Amino acid sequence: MKEETVIKVAGLTKAFGDFTAVNKISFHVRKGEIFGFLGANGAGKTTAMKMLIGISAPSSGSANVAGFDVYTQTENIKKSIGYMSQKFALYDDLTVKENIRFFGGIYGLSKDRISQKSNLLIEELGLEKVANSLVGSLPLGWKQKIAFSVSLLHDPKIVFLDEPTGGVDPITRRQFWEMIYKAANNGTTIFVTTHYMDEAEYCDRVSIMVDGTIEALDTPKNLKSHFGSDSMNDVFLKLARS
Amino acid sequence: MRVILYIINKEFRQIFRNKGMLPIIFILPLLQLVILSNAATYEINNISFGYVDNDHTYTSRALIDKFRASTFFDVAHVFPHQKEGNLAMLQGKVDVVLTIPEHFERDLWKDKNIDLGVTINAIDGAAAGVENVYITQIIKTFNKNLAVDMVHMSNNTVQPVIIEGIPLFWYNKTLNYKTFMVPGILVLLVTMITLFLSGMNIVREKEIGTLEQINVTPIKKHHFIIGKLFPFWVIGMGLLTIGLVLAKLIFATPILGSLALMYFYTSIYILVILGMGLFISNFTDTQQQAMFIAWFFVVIFILMSGLFTPIESMPKWAQVLTEFNPIKYFVEIMRMVMLKGSGFQDILPQLIKTSFYALVMNALAVWSYKKVS
């Protein structure tokens, strides 16, 4: 079986004046893969991701996401991807159901499809009791899980997660990763940035960004043997310090 | 199209769920209408009046009695000399001091010209002007009556001919200031609320991070903007309705012209304001910034709208600037249609300018809203 590539990036660069936030990065992501996008704060992860999801125009280089070009076909990209940002991005003053309906609506889902998806999602997350509560009143961990499910509403080919588990307790983080695995098993490609090195171990492949460039890209296992470390934490520290 | 409905639905839910904003949207403007319409008046009453009578005769007292009889003046002070009068003026106790010279009565009977001293506190120039007119009128009437008396006393059989102009005040017969102010204040409340709400709305989503989430969806720019602004358009029209009802009930403001015409014009006018709000929203990062900029424009627009001060008396360059002031057109239209009963043909120039303005403003707003940075 030939593996399909869903993200192709070559020499992608973003400069803000004199400062080059992302410097000629290149990589491929395969369909159904969980791709970890690691890096210290300010290494350029979020900037790179914003170019891939079509809300920031690259300075140079090329990138193709789900078969569409990031310069000219951003609106097509947006139809094929889901996104969940580190800043929690559901409406606090809408209920869980209303949020689902709104996002389903603007992705162009039919009314029946929205209510069907909505029921399924509420059942899967066990949210029956709070389905009509304002999202703002729910604990952070729940919000993150709902936000992730909402980003999957329109069955995107790729989901971009920008530090999805920031500030969440270990149990919730584990549940969150179970959800990620489930989505990946259904064929959804997962592109995730994180600070937690134990989470890096869950990824199929991991890239590590330092000062705007990708310093390492491989499976967690290969990376550990290459750097002679027994954990991703060590790998990260060795790369980030050098 | 369906997408727009989802956005409108969401916006309305958010607006009506916001317990802090809702009263501001509906109650504040109405308080404004009631309070401002009563308070913003150029009628000058209760002028604190003092006099120095150096003559102490029947005639001088008769003149002062005329002032006492006037509802405009509050004759509160008698000064023995000019010096005390000046001091009281300095201390802010009186606004007008009338000085009657010695031998006032005697000189009058001798047909001499007499100079009455009138001192007016003119810190507020406009008020001083009005006070001057009131004083001159009283003295003129007094003078005329005196002339008639003198003719009688001299047993002359020839009646003096007195020519008097009788003014007719059109469109506001009783010179009621509220009739003049209410349509203008209505303009204010429709404008301010819609501008502030639309200006702060999108920038608010920027602040809480949801705008980024919207920008990664395939939503079309114009769908999003129409969906966002439509609820405020509805609120603007709602405010006009509530305002008109109150104007009729509380102030009995005449509404001579066609209501349909008023609504038609307002529906276009609100588009200008919403476009402006969105434009501000696109260029700001926080609600605070948006608020400051919106205030800046609102204050300038209001002061240069002809609402409180006539545009005709502004310097030429300022009159040119008012051409770019949407509030000016709205104030003109409301006064024309409500008080003069103007029809479609009469308001056509303003209507065309406003429509053009709406087009430009919304084009700018849509253009400046960027999904890709």
Image (cartoon, coloured by chain):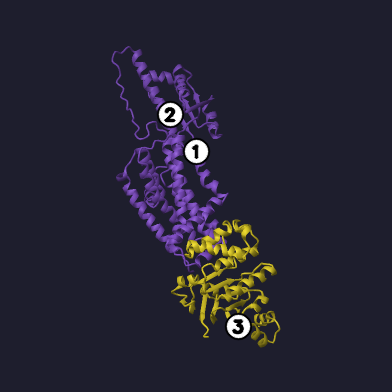
Chain colours: A yellow, B purple
Can you tell which of label 3 and label 2 is closer to the viewer? 3
Instruction: Residue B54: give x, y in percent of width and height.
Output: 49, 22
Give me the chain letter of mark 1: B
Marks 3 and 2 sit apart, C-alpha to C-alpha, by 90 Å
Image mark for residue B135? 2
Give me the chain letter of mark 2: B
Q: Is residue A87 left or right of residue B324?
A: right
Instruction: Residue B46: give x, y in percent of width and height.
Output: 50, 30
Question: In which quadrant is the N terminus of chain B drawn?
Answer: bottom left
Q: Nearer the viewer, residue A33 or B107?
A: A33
Q: Is residue B255 above or below residue A223?
A: above
Can you tell which of label 1 and label 2 is closer to the viewer? 1
- Name the residue carrying label 3: A215
Q: Is residue B129 in view from this perspective?
A: no
Q: Earlier in the sequence, mark 1 or mark 2?
A: 1
Instruction: Residue B351: give x, y in percent of width and height.
Output: 34, 49
Q: Nearer the viewer, residue B64 or B347?
A: B347
Q: Amino acid at mark 3?
A: Glu
Give me the chain letter of mark 3: A
Q: Quadrant of residue B356?
A: bottom left
Image mark for residue B34? 1
* Mark 1 Cα-neighbour bin, 10 Å: few <14, some 14–19, many ≥20: some
Q: Is residue A193 left or right of residue B235?
A: right
Q: Amino acid at mark 1?
A: Val
Marks 3 and 1 sit apart, C-alpha to C-alpha, by 69 Å
Looking at the rendered structure, the number of numbered marks drawn on it comes to 3
Q: Is residue A125 above or below residue B141?
A: below
Q: Amino acid at mark 2?
A: Ile
Mark 1 vs mark 2: same chain?
Answer: yes
- Give the secondary structure at mark 2: helix
The residue drawn where x is 60% and y is 83% is: A215
